[in-house]
Image (cartoon, helix red, strand yellow):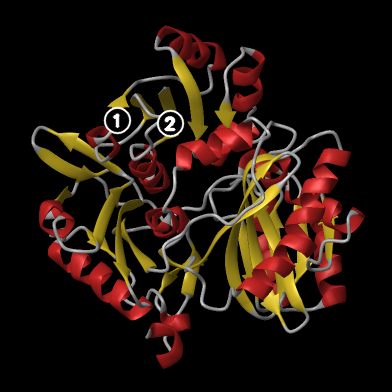
Amino acid sequence: MNVLLIGSGGREHALANSLTKSPLLDRLYAAPGNPGIQRVAEIVTLDLGDHAAVIDFCRLMNIGFVVVGPEAPLVEGIVDALEAAGLRAFGPSRAAARLEGSKGFTKDLCRRFAIPTAAYARFTSATQAKAHVRKEGAPIVVKADGLAAGKGVVVAQTVAEADAAIDLMFSGIFGAAGREIIIEEKLEGEEVSFFALCDGERALSFASAQDHKRVGEADVGPNTGGMGAYSPAPLMDAALAERVMAEIVGPALRGMKELGAPFKGVLFAGLMITSQGPKLIEFNVRFGDPEAQAILPRLEEDLLSLMRACAEGRLEERAVKLSPRNALTVVLAADGYPGPPKKGTEIRGLDRAEIMPGVIVTQAGTRREGGKLLADGGRVLNVTGLGATLAEARARAYAGVDAIDWPGGFCRRDIGWRANSPSQMG
């Protein structure tokens, strides 16, 4: 079958690499894609906000399945439009995508269906929000309700920091996403990303990862979309995964069905593993970026077949076949990120990294100009290493990074540091 992949980041490059392995695939198209994706798919120019144009393209090119990578088109209802036109797509409906599109909606779902999460309150007034902070004290977490490209969360260590975050959220910097804010207690523990495939009725445990959101080493500095990740998460053993499915994923799936918005696609649970057990930080309704770059190379079965089973409501309750190997992904970002990135700097040496054993390079914010590969975004490249141990995966990833010649970029040199113990690093 012909497949259309929507998106342009490192996550979509990793998805494209996995989709091309499927015996079900005839031709893969990508919109808007990137120079890396162009090596395995045909790039097409589409206005993703114009659902009618996307549908027309699918009919013209006999597209049998659409894979939606990023969250924004999902929240805007692209899957509803495709399905109304008789086209199959991987991803949730607009109503189900509220799990990511509105943090307040998700917190209320947790309260209604007894999903363990942080205590919270919702506000549309800065005055009332600040009064709540003074009542609760710090540290405390301030979140924009809507999509904010991974930057709408502030963990305030002091009341003054919380006040500044509240003012920032209501300043309009995040547009409609900041019209309402959520203030939560700060959970203590270790963060884990957990992914489950869902078909509206059933959920299948997929994989775990841990990522590094802060721009600086030792997890300091402002939040980013993610500076690196590794999979599997060392602390996510079978018993803990079973508990997450029973206490968090299962109730969410049942709750969404009860609300008339059954969830299909991949449910990404951002978790805090506390002394009381796993608690939900937030849900996302798509694969993580950069978690996908670490998870998907470990998949040892047909991704396209799994995605179709989700969309068609026929998931089998079984274990997904994942390699026992470890994977670690390092993100290379342009100077200036997470502020305005420096664009247009040349990147060389990708071919050297790509031929190294156990190394995969995926592109994100890149463009081609003549024969040159140039930086064209904040997070620009991802280098993934695979190994029998996390230490081996890490060594291969950084060897790949060092083979790339890009003076205009930087990366963190400590990805995987939380797992840096003899028992976990191997």
As drawn, the residue found furthest toward the bottom would be 422
Residue under the image location 43 percent in, 31 percent down: 5
Residue under the image location 88 percent in, 55 percent down: 113
Mark 2 element type: strand
Across and down, in percent, residue 270 comes to 63, 62
Residue under the image location 52 percent in, 72 percent down: 233
Q: Tell me if residue 24 comes above or below residue 108 in the rendering.
A: above
Residue 414 left/right relative to 187: left
Q: Tell me if residue 336 comes above or below residue 373 in the rendering.
A: below
User: As rendered, which of 267 and 221 lies closer to the eye?
Assistant: 267
Across and down, in percent, residue 257 comes to 83, 39
Q: Label 1: few (<14), some or many (≥20) within 10 Å?
A: many
Q: Name the residue that disc number 1 marks.
A: 41
Q: Name the residue that disc number 2 marks.
A: 5
Residue type marked 1 = Ala
Res 200 seen here: yes
Residue under the image location 37 percent in, 55 percent down: 297
Q: Quadrant of the N terminus?
A: top left
Across and down, in percent, residue 230 comes to 43, 68
Residue 91: quarter of image: top right
Residue 356 left/right relative to 44: left
Residue 72: quarter of image: top right
Across and down, in percent, residue 136 comes to 84, 75
Res 348 seen here: no
Q: Quadrant of the C terminus?
A: bottom left
Q: Are marks 1 and 2 in contact (CB under 8 Å)?
A: yes
Mark 1 element type: loop
* Distance of label 1 from label 2 (alpha carbons): 9 Å
Q: Label 2: few (<14), some or many (≥20) within 10 Å?
A: many
